[in-house]
Image: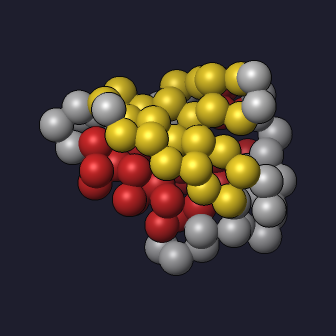
């Protein structure tokens, strides 16, 4: 299992469209991927779960991935959340 804390760099935060994109990115990986924010932990491949987080730009979250492609999954999601992709 791999965990990484990330600060959201997307100017819009995690609104509907960015959440949909994040779910699409997470769904490309076989690993189980979760996003943690404060006391909430949701499946990164679940659009409804991700929408409940309501994260804003500059807030921190923790990505955890467990599986054969966990490193690629964390790096792919990190790149997106930092606004690199």
**Residue 42 image point, x, y percent:** 60, 24
Picture quadrant of residue 64: top left
Which residue does the image show at 52% across and 76% down from the upper left? 84
Question: Which part of the image, by quadrant, shows the N terminus?
Answer: top left
- In the rendered image, the residue lying farthest to the left is 68
67 in relation to 54, above or below: above
Residue at 38% from the left image edge and 59% from the top image edge: 75
- The reply, left or right, for residue 68 in relation to residue 76 is left
Task: Pick whichever, 60 or 54, lies toward us.
Answer: 60
Please give left or right for residue 45 compared with residue 11 in the image. Answer: left
In the visual, does 75 lie left or right of 38? left
In this rendering, does residue 34 appear at all?
Answer: yes
Seen as rendered, the residue at the extreme bottom is 84
**Quarter-of-image position of residue 11:** bottom right
Q: In front here: 63 or 12?
A: 63
Spot occupied by residue 8 in the image (x, y as percentages of width and height): 69, 60
- Compared to 10, does 64 lie above or below? above
Q: Residue 59 in the image: state x and y as whole percent.
A: 79, 54
Q: Is residue 80 above or below residue 5?
A: below
Q: Is residue 25 visible?
A: no
Residue at 36% from the left image edge and 40% from the top image edge: 2
């Amino acid at each position: 299992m791999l965990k990484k804390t990330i600060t959201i760099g997307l100017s819009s935060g995690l609104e509907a469209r960015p959440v949909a994109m994040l779910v699409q990115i997470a769904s490309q990986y076989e690993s189980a991927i979760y996003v943690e924010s404060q006391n909430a932990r949701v499946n990164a491949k679940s659009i409804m779960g991700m929408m409940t987080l309501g994260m804003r730009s500059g807030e921190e979250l923790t990505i955890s991935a467990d599986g054969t492609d966990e490193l690629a999954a964390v790096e792919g999601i990190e790149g997106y959340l930092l606004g690199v992709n």
